[in-house]
Amino acid sequence: MAEESEGTVLLAGAANLAIAVAKCIAGLLSGSTALLAEAAHSVADTLNQVFLMTALKRSRKPADGKHPFGYGLERYFWSLLAAVGIFVLGAGFSIAEGIRAILHPEPVAALLVAYAVLAVSFVFEGVSWLKAVRQLRREAAEHGDSTLEHLRDSAEPAVKTVAFEDSAALIGLLLAAVGITLTAVTGKEFFDGAASVAIGILLIGVAFVLGRDNKAMLIGQALPAAVEEQIRAEIAGTPGIDAVVELLSLRLAADQVLVVVRVDLDNSETTGAAVEKLAEQIDTQVRREFPAVRHLFLDPTPGPS
C-alpha cells in the first residue's frame, strides 16, 4: 500500500507543479484573476505533496523506546499541515484576489491561451484524480467496504488528501472556465473575480473536511462500531471465552490498529499455561481475519456477577 500511495502522491505532485507554472503564465497573459487563483491552488497542492511524501516516509520508521507503537500517526500530522496549506495558500489567495478583482476590475484577454491551459490542466488533474480513486476503490474492495465508507473511515490519509485536492482542482477549473466565459460574453469582469472567490470557498470546504478528519485521528479514533462488533464476535466465539467484557480500539495509522480486550474466561481456562495458549490463539485468529490489527492485548477479567 505504501509504495502505491507514494506513486499516487508523486504523480499528483508532478502534475500540480507543471499545471501551476502553466496557470500562472496564462493568468498573467490573460489578466484572469480566476486563473491566478487556480495557479495559487496548484502551488498549494504542490507544496502539500511534499508534506504527504514526508508523512509516508516518516510513518514507516520502526518502533523504538520512545514510540513503542511506531510512527504511524505522523501520517495524520503531516496531512493536517497539508489541509492548513490548502486553507492559507489556496483559499486565502483566491478570495483576496477575487475581492480585489471585483472592486478593481481589469479586462480579460488572451482567451485562447486561458482556455488551452484550462483544458490541459483538466486532463492532467483528471489523470491524477483517477489514480487516487482507483487506489481507493481497490482498497475499499479489499476491506469489503464501499468506496465512500473506506474514504470516510480508513483511507490512507495521503491518498485521501490527493483525492480531495484533485476533486477540488477539477471543480475549480470548471469554475474558472465559467468565470472567464461569462466575463468574455458579458464584458463584465465581475464574473472572473466571483469565480476566484468561489474557488476560495471551495478550498475552505476541502481544508475543513481534511483538517477535521485528521484531527480526529490525531486525538485518537476507534474503529467503526461495525468492525469492533465483528472483532468482538470473533473473540466471543472462541472456545474458552465466556464473554467479552470490554473492547477498545485505536487507530495508529490507516493500516495499523491497537485493540485491547477484557474477557471473562470460562472455568476450564484458569491455569497460566491455558490462558497463554488461549491468548495466542485469539491473537492469531483476529490478525488473520483483520490484518490491520497489529497489536492485540487480552486482559482476563471476571465479568459482572
Image (cartoon, helix red, strand yellow):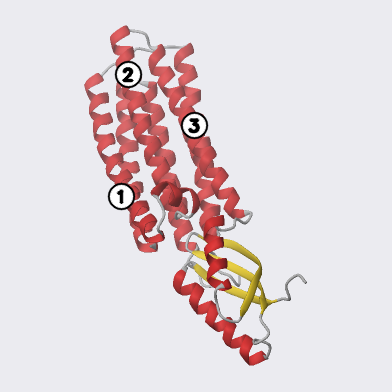
User: The disc labelled 2 sits on which kind of residue?
Assistant: Ile
Residue 91 or residue 104, whichever sits in front: 91
Residue occupying the point 50% across, 34% down:
205
The residue that mark 3 highlights is 91
Mark 3 lies on a secondary structure that is: helix
Give whichever of discs 3 and 1 has the lower sequence position.
3
Give whichever of discs 3 and 2 has the lower sequence position.
3
The residue that mark 1 highlights is 131
Q: Can residue 65 be seen in this view?
A: no
The residue that mark 2 highlights is 180
Q: Using residue 225 as the reference point, say whether residue 196 is left or right of it.
A: left
Residue contact at pointers 2 and 1, CB within 8 angstroms: no
Residue 255 on image: x %, y %: 47, 63
Give the spatial CA distance, label 2 vs label 1: 29 Å
Q: Establish if 116 lies above or below 111.
A: below
Label 3 CA crowd tier, 10 Å (few <14, some 14–19, many 20+): many
Indicate the quadrant where residue 5 lies. bottom left
Quadrant (top left, top right, bottom left, bottom right) of the C terminus: bottom right
Give the spatial CA distance, label 3 vs label 2: 19 Å
Quadrant (top left, top right, bottom left, bottom right) of the N terminus: bottom left
Label 2 CA crowd tier, 10 Å (few <14, some 14–19, many 20+): many
Give the spatial CA distance, label 3 vs label 1: 25 Å
Residue 35 or residue 147, whichever sits in front: 147
User: The disc labelled 3 sits on which kind of residue?
Assistant: Ala
Residue 3 on image: x %, y %: 36, 63
Mark 2 lies on a secondary structure that is: helix
Residue 26 on image: x %, y %: 30, 27
Q: Establish if 290 lies above or below 167.
A: below
Mark 1 lies on a secondary structure that is: helix
Q: Using residue 122 as the reference point, say whether residue 205 is left or right of it.
A: right
Q: Establish if 66 lies above or below 221.
A: below
